[in-house]
Amino acid sequence: MAETAVTRLTSVRSDIAAAEQDAQRDAGCVTLIAVSKTFEVDDIRPVLEAGQRVFGENRVQEAMSKWPDLRSEFDGIELHLIGPLQSNKAKEAVATFDVIHTIDREKIAKALKAEMDKQGRPLPCFIQVNTGEEPQKAGIGPRELESFLKYCRDEIGLNVVGLMCIPPVDEAPGPHFALLEKLADRHGLSKLSMGMSSDYDTAVGLGATHVRVGSAIFGTRDYPA
Ligand SMILES: *Cc1c(COP(=O)(O)O)cnc(C)c1O
């Protein structure tokens, strides 16, 4: 059979099911986020027709240009923001997305909370943790997490459900996933957004509740995201 997004989706789903079973986790406990960034509506539609409903995009503007049309064609779409956010896009982000994965500083947290209140959309949020403490990378440092979490949850009342990470590209991801799991557990957070095309099976083994898989479903991206 020719490799299409739909055949690849099927194999990613069965890999996840196998990884859940290997880790003695409940069948279906991991949510697959199909990362459709850079792909067009016509590339995404077959994946929706195959039953996938949870998608990830990393740019607010791009998501706004693609998803209103798809939402009018398909019920039950859940759209996750997995890319960096600027506070001047908070309004559009809250209107366009259903879950936000990339909260990593007070200014963003505050701007989003204000918009959520205004729009009456208290979206579930993940805090992005820079587990590798890479200077160029988004995310709160593991040592700052406790006070940042206190700010988000207790001071402003954001609905923080879990943690998200993107491990350094040149390191084995396992220790980063294990660290994220430990941090979430310590702070009473039940959701873990971790694992991409190259390492989602490892992430499932280490407790991921959400994996963000792009190229393993949609194919290689023509231009960098
Ligand atoms: C692009 C992206 C992904 C998906 O990456 P693939 O390697 O194509 O699976 C996952 N998470 C984030 C934050 C991304 O930006």
Image (tube, helix red, strand yellow):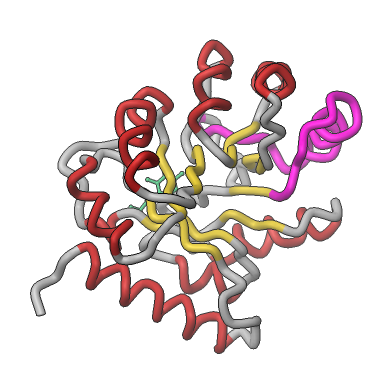
Q: Residue furthest top?
A: 88
- The spot of residue 224 in percent (x, y) is 25, 37
Residue occupying the point 23% across, 72% down: 7
Residue occupying the point 65% across, 57% down: 192
Q: Residue furthest right?
A: 154
Q: Quadrant of residue 123?
A: top right
How many labels were placed on the picture?
A: 0
Q: For this view, does 150 lie left or right of residue 52? A: right
Range shown magenta:
136-162
Residue occupying the point 59% across, 41% down: 99
Residue 86 in magenta stretch: no
Depth check: give the residue in front, 14 or 171.
14
- The spot of residue 210 in percent (x, y) is 56, 59
- The spot of residue 195 in percent (x, y) is 49, 60
Q: Residue furthest left?
A: 2
Residue occupying the point 55% across, 32% down: 138
Depth check: give the residue in front, 101 or 187.
101
Q: For this view, does 198 lie left or right of residue 28? A: left
